[in-house]
Image: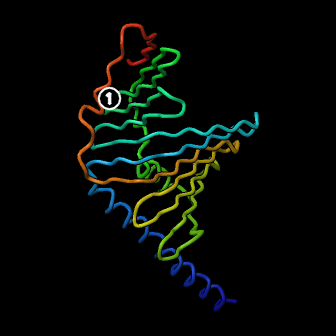
């Protein structure tokens, strides 16, 4: 029995090593990213209401700002700076502004937020695709698909089985972002709810 236990412990240590290596390599890759641009598709699902929604657009970020610029639904934006988060809807002419209290929006930030306090499991570890599943103490889980050392897909599932999934494609790293991409100004005809303190 003791030999079996030692074998299982040894097997687990072999299994854990590639997992940490995958995460460390991701950290190295994303630390080198000064600007990021990609097409994204977003899938939302609300379990209790059995409602699904598909959205899409482009994501841009640098060291201090992030923008989700939606094509569908058209005119919606999520802008995150070091100090504030702005949610804007052009159709309803509504904007909500709040403090940025350590908002994790970048794919690597979401992964890092879960990493150290979650149970981890490798679902796939091939040369071209790694899939990692993490479950935290509140039974929320995150599933991350990694291709060519970049996060290609990230799924977040809360304890009530509501989920949001992002798929990234046409990724451009450390290329010049469109001019004034983060310089969004709210016009005077927009109804603004500002909850910043």
Extreme residue in the top direction: 189
> Where's residue 18, x and y in %?
47, 75
> Where's residue 166, x and y in %?
53, 48
- Relative to 158, say whether 122 is above or below: below
Question: How many numbered marks, from 0 up?
Answer: 1
Which residue corresponds to mark 1? 83
* Res 4 quadrant in image: bottom right
Q: Nearer the viewer, residue 177 or 33?
A: 177
Q: Would residue 57 appear left or right of 121 to someone viewing this image?
A: left
> Where's residue 69, x and y in %?
42, 34
Q: How is the image coloured?
A: rainbow
Q: Residue at position x 39%, y 65% from top?
A: 149
> Where's residue 171, x and y in %?
38, 54
Q: Would residue 125 appear left or right of 162 to someone viewing this image?
A: left
Q: Residue at position x 50%, y 28% from top?
A: 74
Q: Nearer the viewer, residue 138 or 196?
A: 196
Extreme residue in the bottom direction: 3
Q: Would residue 41 appear left or right of 171 to someone viewing this image?
A: right
Q: Residue at position x 53%, y 77% from top?
A: 15
Q: Residue at position x 45%, y 18% from top?
A: 95
Quadrant showing the C terminus: top left
Quadrant showing the N terminus: bottom right
């Amino acid at each position: 029995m003791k030999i079996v236990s030692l074998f299982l412990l040894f097997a687990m240590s072999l299994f854990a090593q590639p997992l940490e290596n995958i995460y460390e390599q991701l950290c190295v890759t994303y630390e080198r990213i000064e600007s990021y641009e990609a097409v994204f598709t977003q899938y939302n699902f609300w379990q209790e209401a059995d409602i699904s929604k598909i959205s899409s657009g482009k994501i841009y970020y640098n060291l201090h700002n992030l923008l989700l610029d939606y094509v569908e639904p058209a005119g919606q934006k999520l802008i995150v700076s070091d100090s504030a988060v702005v949610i804007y809807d052009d159709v309803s002419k509504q904007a909500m502004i709040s403090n940025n209290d350590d908002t994790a929006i970048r794919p690597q930030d979401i992964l890092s937020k879960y990493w150290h306090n979650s149970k981890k499991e490798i679902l796939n570890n091939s040369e071209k695709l790694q899939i990692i599943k993490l479950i935290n103490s509140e039974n929320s889980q995150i599933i991350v698909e990694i291709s060519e050392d970049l996060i290609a897909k990230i799924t977040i599932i809360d304890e009530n089985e509501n989920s949001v999934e992002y798929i990234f494609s046409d990724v451009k790293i450390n290329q010049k972002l469109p001019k004034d991409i983060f310089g969004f100004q709210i016009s005077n005809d927009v109804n603004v709810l500002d909850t910043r303190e």
